[in-house]
Every structure is written in structure tokens, then in C-alpha cells.
Amino acid sequence: MRDTFLGSNLAPVSGGGGLAPPAYTDDTLFSALVKAVRRFGRHTPGQWEDMKPATYGYGDLLKMTLALGRLVCKITEPGEHVGLLMPNMAVTAGLLIGASAFGRVPCMLNYTAGAEGMQNACHTARIRVVVTSREFLAKANLVEEVGHLRGVELYYLEDMRATFSLADKLWLMGFALWAPLLAVPRSDPEAPAVVLFTSGSEGKAKGVVLSHRALLANVGQILEILPLTPADKIFNCLPIFHSFGLTAGVLVPLFCGIKLFLYVSPLHYKVIPQLIHDKACTTLFATGTFLNHYARHSTPGDFRSLVYVVAGAEKLAGPVRDLWADKFGITILEGYGTTETAPVLAVNTPAACRQGSVGRLLPRVEARLKPVPGIGRGGELHVRGPNLMSGYYRYEAPGVLEPPASAVGAGWYGTGDVVDLDAEGYLSVIGRLRRFAKVAGEMVSLEMVEDIARAVSAEGMHAATCASDLQRGETIILFTTDSDLTREQLAAAAHGMGYPEIAVPRRIRVVDNLPLLGSGKVDYAKLNLLGTQA
């Protein structure tokens, strides 16, 4: 079996027509912000909103970024990694860009990972200083968990603001706001702009180092194919510590004049539809799991203003796609990506959409498929491109950059996803390599098992895992919120869908809710533990 070379997508995929993609070849996040201020003007009231009463124009965002970067300099050294433990607020984006502008490396801590997960992240990236907020910790019930962190110094934004002296104010108002590029050190686009952390489903979380170049390249790639304009308004409730929430939900609107409403949590299923309606948002980024909940807790009129709904981070279930089409008349645009690619690799567009696929590869992404023994079609996806990470930090070698490399060669990244490609270039994700069960010698996709369950019970939530079995190698376990679901129903559905009987789960476990990661994905690591206890 030979590799399939998909080539390099060098031309824009049809479906663009919105903003001209910015040229960010020599830019950093901060210099790109300065360009946006010059392009769209300082006085743009209502450009950004969050849960604070005030709104922010571009001049406000620039001022915030410079001031917060100056404050971070008081507690860190050049080149130092600094942890940011903050909610979805404008101030968080200001901290991230401000810290990187002054040569620090912001590391976005996942506050849903628990004390151990945050501690491991701090160790992996060699974080000494963590910037957070007392108000946020109290509201998010994180005071106790953060209190367990060891080997780090906590700095609270409320206290840091008091250290902004008269000299700092004179520097900001008299110089930095008017010559912003002279007010910060010269920076390299290849330097680290941010460190994000993987979910840790394969062990301890890895630190993904993304350069300014990678993030800005992905912004440009997205704008080449999605017809977004400054007339649009994005609603983003995906956490900024997740790459989808950061790049699509913050950087795209920031650098391109698109209005943005930042909301603190994707879990408020009843509140979010009303906010989207009240704020007249036109664009929503979310995971399929969250879209399912929003649809079931809303009325058809709540999403009247929405033009684009883009799903990513996990496979979009067919019943969710159908629910949005039937109830709201909205076609969900499914995309695909990984944290390591900043994150978007492919996405459907209004003009080029194939249901069941994740769209076509973005411009300037090269890809190869390597055959996987036991899986008849497609292969493991390996990619490289301008949006690829600089490398990993690993727990075993904290702070040591491991450049990307895969079975294809140095500079390539093996996604761990098995995908197929049709004649017109649309990608379909068959499943994660680690989400195949070997049952009686045959490879069975656990995502296929979940599709069968959804065909029987569209209203329920379903997730499949597997456990060792002395007779069959592995046995499939289905976790479901539908207490009426039976194996006989699943077997009949599998037969009708043309799926093999071997894909019907041996065991069904009813749960009240499926465990979710902060990004909205199902927490399969927790389910795997539950499966071993079944």
C-alpha cells in the first residue's frame, strides 16, 4: 500500500468573496493589531463587547494591550513563559497580545482541566508566573483548585492595575499610543506567540507552541474562503484557551474589522440563544455538541440574524445538522483542524459545501495520506503548511521545543486522524486512529458505532469506547443518555445503514450526561476509565 499525495492547495478554495486576506508575512500579533487600528480607525465604538457594561473600539483595544503588556513586564523577564488563567473577556485578548508584544510567551491555562491538569501545564511550559483575576476565580469556583498550584506565583489583575504608575501613564498616553511599534521591542514573526495545551487524552497534556506566523497565516487562510466582512458580528463563547476559540473566535474578528461579542461560557444553553438574538450576531463558531444543546433550548426566532454557523473540534452528528436545517433553515458549515495547525485545516463554505465532509483543505496546506493496516479506505492524514506549529513542549522535557516531524518526514505533522478524499477534494474524517476497536481481528470505527446510535436515538447523547476482551480482543461499550435504547434496535439500524454486525456494541451503559472537555468535545479519557470499570 502506497502513500496518497494530496498535493498542495495553492489557490483559494471557491467560496470566498468577503474581506481581502491580509498579508501578514512579516507581522506579529501586535503589529497586525496596529495595522487593523490604522485600517479601521481608532474610534469604532461597539467593535468588541463582553459581559462588562462597556464596549471597546480599536483605540481602546490598543490602549489595553499596551498597558497590560507593560504590567506583565513588571513581574516577568524577557523570553519568560507566563500563564494566563482568564475567562473569555476582552482583557484576556489584551493580556495575550500585550505579553507577546513585549517578548513574553503567554501560555493559556485550561481552567476546566482541574488542579492537576493546570499544574502539569505549568511544569511542561516552565511557568513561574500566572496572571489571573480574583473576581474570575470566585465566579468560576476556582479558588480552591488554584490554591493547590505549587511552584508558581499568582498575580491578580486587580492588584497589578494599582502598580501602573504616573510614569507608566505618561509613557502610554504621550508616546506608546501614538508610536506603538516604537514602544515595544522588535519581534520575530517566527517567535512563539502563544502556548496552548492539548486535552491530555493520550497522557499528560502537551504544550503546542504556535508562532505569530502560524496564527496569522491561519487567519489569512480562513478569510480567503469564508465571505466574512466588517458588516458581520461574531458570537464567540468557545474558550480562548482552545485554538478554535482563539483563532476563529478572537483573532479573525480582531484583525479584520469584524464585530465581536465574547461570552464567558459555552455551557449556558438557555442564555446563549437569547444573547445571539439580542446582539444580532451573524456568525457562530461552536462544536457539534454545543450546537445540539443550543438548538434544543431555543425558538426558531432566536437565530434569525445568523448567516454562518461553523462547527469544528469534533465530528458533526447528522441529527444535529438536520435539526438546524429543519428548525432554523441554517446549513451548518462543518470544518476540521487541530491545535497543532492553529487550528483550521479544512472547512465547508457557503459556495462549496458537501454534507458529511469537512470541506476542502485550506490554501497552502500540503497533505499526504498514509495507509493504515486493517482500514480499507483513506489513510492517516499528514500535513504541513504556514499554519503548522513550531513544535511541542512535553512534560518529560519541560520547555524544550520538539519540532514537528512525522512518518512522512521532518516538518510534517501526523494528525492521528484517518480521512478519505473524494474526486472533488472534499475530506471526510473516518475516525481517530486511537478510536478504532479491534474486534475479532477486524478494525471497527467507534465513530461508526456512534452514528448507529444516533440513527436510532437522535435526541440522546452517545459515545462509544472499548475495553479488553479475552475472547474477541476488544469489546465495544456504548455510553448513552437514552435509557430506552436496546441492542436489538442498534442491530436493526446497523443492518439498514449497511454497517457490519460487528459494529453493534456488546454493552450499553446509561448515564445522565456525557463528560465534556472545556472545548466541548466528549471526554473520552474519562469514558475509557468508566469502561474499564464496567
Image (tube, rainbow, N blue to C red):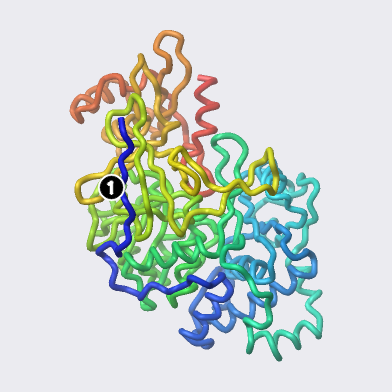
Q: Which amino acid does label 1 sit on?
A: Ser
- Image point 46% across, 47% down: which residue? 412
Q: Can residue 36 be seen in this view?
A: yes
| Badge 1: residue crowd in 10 Å (few <14, some 14–19, many ≥20) | many
Residue 410, how many percent across, how many down?
50, 45
Would you name the residue on which mark 1 appears? 357
Outermost bottom residue: 174
Q: Residue at x 47, y 53 (%)?
A: 341
| Residue 234 position (above or below residue 169) | above
Residue 466 horizontal side relative to residue 500, left or right: right
Q: Is residue 226 left or right of residue 136?
A: left
Give the x, y percent position of residue 115. Answer: 69, 43
Residue 484 seen anywhere in this rendered image of the structure:
no
Q: Which of 115 and 42 is in front in this view?
A: 42
Left or right position of 237 against 159:
left
Query: Measuring 36% from the left and 78% from the top, which residue is drawn there?
Result: 231
Residue 304 against residue 519 in the figure, above or below: below
In the rendered image, residue 169, in percent from the top left (x then y), is placed at 75, 85
- Viewer-nearest residue: 389 or 30: 389
Quarter holding the N terminus is top left
